Amino acid sequence: MSVTCFIRYEIDPFKRDDFVEYARNWGQAIPRCGADLIGYFAPHEGSATIAYGVYNVENLAAYEAYRARIAADPLGRRNYEFARDRRFILKEDRFFLKHVSSPHGESAT
């Protein structure tokens, strides 16, 4: 069973478009580097500062290998630099959860 990485971002609400560009770049790089990207989510209604990135990896060892690949990926490096230079991410928290509610729907009896 895989684990899901949730990244909670606090972003500058006046630089939302920068976050959207950042997210679209990860949409290309993350799958290429071996993680199963669920998606990036930008503020829409309610908070203007909270955003998320969500992807699956097989286990924490696979996560470490993925992190090495994304750090070496040309788009990955450019995206890290873009975030550093534009400073639209104010805070980033990363945590891992296991999906435990499957299967969904009616239970078999």
Image (cartoon, rainbow, N blue to C red):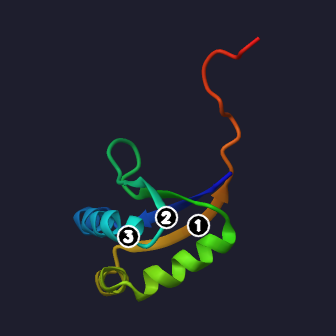
Quadrant for residue 15, please give it: bottom left
Rendering coords of residue 70 (x, y %)? 44, 79
What distance separates the C-alpha of mark 1 from that of mark 3?
A: 20 Å
Rendering coords of residue 21 (x, y %)? 24, 67
Residue count near mark 1 (Cα–Cα under 10 Å), binned few <14, some 14–19, many ≥20: few
Q: Nearer the viewer, residue 82 or 96?
A: 96
Q: Residue furthest right?
A: 109
Left or right: 4 in relation to 45: right
Residue ID for mark 3: 32
- Identify the residue at horizontal 38%, vertical 70% (top origin): 32
- Identify the residue at horizontal 45%, vertical 64% (top origin): 10
> How many numbered dots are placed on residues in this image?
3
Secondary structure beneath label 1: strand
Q: Nearer the viewer, residue 25 or 51?
A: 25
- Identify the residue at horizontal 32%, vertical 62% (top origin): 13
N-terminal-most mark, 1 or 3: 3
Residue ID for mark 2: 35
For the residues bearing labels 1 and 2, Cβ distance under 8 angstroms: no
Rendering coords of residue 85 (x, y %)? 30, 87
N-terminal-most mark, 1 or 2: 2
What distance separates the C-alpha of mark 1 from that of mark 2?
A: 15 Å
User: The disc labelled 3 sits on which kind of residue?
Assistant: Arg
Which of discs 1 and 2 lies nearer the camera? The answer is 2
Residue count near mark 3 (Cα–Cα under 10 Å), binned few <14, some 14–19, many ≥20: some
Residue ID for mark 1: 94
Rendering coords of residue 50 (x, y %)? 44, 56
Secondary structure beneath label 3: helix
Left or right: 27 in relation to 10: left
- Identify the residue at horizontal 27%, vertical 62% (top origin): 20
Residue count near mark 2 (Cα–Cα under 10 Å), binned few <14, some 14–19, many ≥20: many
